[in-house]
């Protein structure tokens, strides 16, 4: 059992998302940074889709009411277990009564508390994710509040090891200070914009405004203009799609993206970079970098390779402890 002692608004239970219902108007939801979720679950030996707590307002404080191993992924910041400072991206075991405090991250925007066995809330439409707008899934379909108690499988696994955050391990892009570089592919309506607007889209540093949330990131910059006014029929919408409403400032669809829309589509953030966008803070800037499908697929292979390395290292570490404990080796690797 995990008891919430302190929380801000909109912290919620999330897993990898809800799939197969978009044709019924049900969005995917799920963790904004699915890479952080998958890495945390891999370190703990969980199934990839095990539910976690997504923390995006701080401080966040919970009490573990039974012994359990956990890891905090996503951003990087100050973590304390009782009076002891601990590391993010590092497997730690808590004892009954231990209190974990997650303070505002120094790097990134969101943190993910993954526990051994996952957060145990009922599945709704095949997922434990909270659909905040619909008011279902997760913990009673709402953000977490002080005093909430959530069950978990509990139990401890070998700890004392961790992973390099993807911000260091996947450092192929050169981000400027307070600017996140995102690789995008031109979308269906790209050539409906003026040549000047298309050039500006790539050259500009777009600021993430305070009107951004899990539904979408609204960007601030000079307006993008169409060659001529037009109306489009509604089409399917997915996370990463960049739409341009009449005001001309782009909106990037995020985890709670609408299932359909009709604004012109100028580009789409590749799947391999969505975690970078999820960790970009309000007020920071985005620079778009044009790429093609082949480059997008290669980038995703690099993400999968990173996760495979994390899983392999986790398995080797646990095997080394078993060998040590059975006396087959006298030295911990």
Image: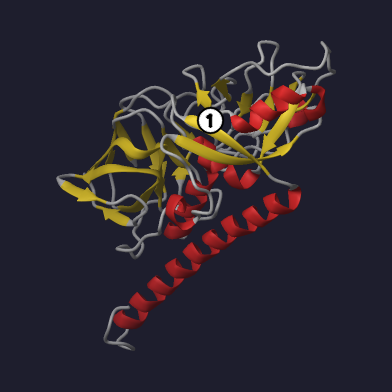
Q: Is residue 285 visible?
A: yes
Q: Is residue 216 above or below residue 300?
A: above
Q: Secondary structure at mark 1?
A: loop
Q: Is residue 44 above or below residue 110?
A: below
153 vs 206, nearest the viewer:
206
In the picture, residue 316 is in which quadrant? bottom left
229 on left or right of 87: right
304 vs 273, nearest the viewer:
273
Instruction: Kindly give the residue lying farthest to the left in the view shown.
Output: 83
44 on left or right of 1: right
Residue depicted at 37% across the width and 53% down the height: 89
User: Where is residue 75 shown, x and y percent of the image?
Assistant: 39, 42
Q: Quadrant of the N terminus?
A: top left
**Residue highlighted by disc 1:** 130
User: Where is residue 66 shown, x and y percent of the image?
Assistant: 29, 48
290 vs 73, nearest the viewer:
290
89 vs 232, nearest the viewer:
232
């Amino acid at each position: 059992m995990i008891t919430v002692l302190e929380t801000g608004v909109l912290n919620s239970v999330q897993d990898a998302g809800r799939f197969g219902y978009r044709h019924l108007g049900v969005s995917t939801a799920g963790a904004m940074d699915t890479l952080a979720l998958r890495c945390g679950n891999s370190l703990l030996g969980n199934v990839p889709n095990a539910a976690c707590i997504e923390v995006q307002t701080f401080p966040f404080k919970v009490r573990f009411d039974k012994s359990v191993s956990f890891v905090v992924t996503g951003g990087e910041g100050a973590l304390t277990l009782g009076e002891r400072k601990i590391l993010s991206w590092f497997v730690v075991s808590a004892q009954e009564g231990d209190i974990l405090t997650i303070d505002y991250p120094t790097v990134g925007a969101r943190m993910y508390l993954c526990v051994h066995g996952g957060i145990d809330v009922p599945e709704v439409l095949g997922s434990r994710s909270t659909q905040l707008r619909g008011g279902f899934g997760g913990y009673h379909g709402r953000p977490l509040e002080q005093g909430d108690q959530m069950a978990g499988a509990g139990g401890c696994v070998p700890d004392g090891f961790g992973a390099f955050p993807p911000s260091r391990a996947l450092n192929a892009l050169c981000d400027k200070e307070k600017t996140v570089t995102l690789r995008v592919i031109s979308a269906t309506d790209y050539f409906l914009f003026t040549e000047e607007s298309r050039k500006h889209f790539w050259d500009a540093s777009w600021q993430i405004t305070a009107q951004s949330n899990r539904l979408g990131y609204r960007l601030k910059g000079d307006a993008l203009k169409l060659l001529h006014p037009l109306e489009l029929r509604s089409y399917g919408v997915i996370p990463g799609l960049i739409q341009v409403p009449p005001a001309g400032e782009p909106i990037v669809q995020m985890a709670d993206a609408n299932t359909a829309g009709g604004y012109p589509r100028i580009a789409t953030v590749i799947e391999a970079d969505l975690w970078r966008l999820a960790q970009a803070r309000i007020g920071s800037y985005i620079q778009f970098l044009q790429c093609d499908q082949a480059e997008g697929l290669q980038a995703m292979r690099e993400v999968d390779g990173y996760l495979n390395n994390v899983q392999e290292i986790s398995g080797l570490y646990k095997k080394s402890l078993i060998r040590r404990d059975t006396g087959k080796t006298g030295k911990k690797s």
